[in-house]
Image (spheres, rainbow, N blue to C red):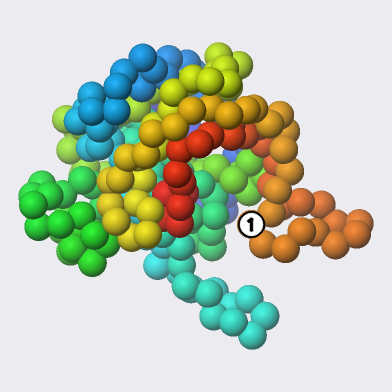
Amino acid sequence: DEYLTLYNFEKAIEEKNSKNKFIKKIKKMSKAAFKGQDAKTIYAKWKYSVVWITNPVNYIKGDEIISGNIGTGSLIDNNGLILTNWHVIENANQVYVYPFPKDPSKGLQMDKATKAERFLARVVAKNKKTDLALVQVTGISKRIPPISLGVNDEVQPGEKVFAIGHPDLYGWDISPGTVRGIMPQEPWNYGPAPKEGEEYDHEATLLRTSATIEGGSSG
């Protein structure tokens, strides 16, 4: 399997080595899964391919104890490989993954959805600069269709977009919008801007959209 080079969990994951592997794998997935479909069709088919991720690792920043992040992930192959953001899995070697509940009638809020089926996933690749990460989970249903990804060069302002995530601790929420613009190699920080002489934490080509993306939808 071509992803086996990412699965050596026993060794430390070095960001400088992960970057090239990460980008190489993603570029192979060139056909966007959602393109040309409406919101109802997208949600019905792809909600199962979107997972909830919780990071159990707390860390100390200054005088503060910061709780582990929560976010969203997308299943991108049949071997349990999930794409998410680096800041969702920050400081963790393992995270918890929750698939779409088998009985959604019990509620999709975090306190209900996270009491359902749960899997432990390993962080297998990460790149802080681009704010991307891959986690791998075993045991998740093979019947869940993996999401194929598009490439930035094919995206045009004005195209429809849909975000599926977990905003404000409510799971599997879909938000429609349009591509407002493309920001090539945009630097950013999630916290304060860097001081003089310092670099931004992250840099990547970003898509500006009007789709609502709130806390819990990262990934």
What percent of the width, then of the height, locates residue 96?
A: 33, 58
- Which of these two is toward me, 86 or 120? 86
- Which of these two is toward me, 162 or 114? 162
**Vertically, is 165 above or below 31?**
below
Q: Residue at x 18, y 63 (%)?
A: 112
* Quadrant location of the N terminus in the rendered image: top left
* Quadrant location of the C terminus in the rendered image: top left
For the question of whether residue 3 can be seen, the reply is no
What percent of the width, then of the height, locates residue 80?
A: 31, 38
- Please tell me in which quadrant of the rendered image residue 131 appears: top right
Residue 201 lies left or right of residue 73; in this view the side is right
Q: Residue at x 81, y 52 (%)?
A: 199
The total number of labels drawn is 1
The residue wearing badge 1 is 190
Q: Residue at x 54, y 54 (%)?
A: 87
What percent of the width, then of the height, locates residue 51?
A: 30, 45
- Please tell me in which quadrant of the rendered image residue 118 appears: bottom left
Instruction: Please name the amino acid that badge 1 sits on.
Output: Tyr
Residue 166 lies left or right of residue 153; in this view the side is left
**Vertically, is 45 above or below 11?**
above
In this view, which residue lies farthest toward the bottom? 63
What percent of the width, then of the height, locates residue 72?
A: 39, 48
**Vertically, is 184 above or below 66?**
above
- Label 1, residues with CA under 10 Å away: few <14, some 14-19, many ≥20: few
Residue 56 lies left or right of residue 133; in this view the side is left
**Vertically, is 211 above or below 171?**
above
For the question of whether residue 86 can be seen, the reply is yes
- Which of these two is toward me, 169 or 89? 169
Q: Residue at x 36, y 45 (%)?
A: 165
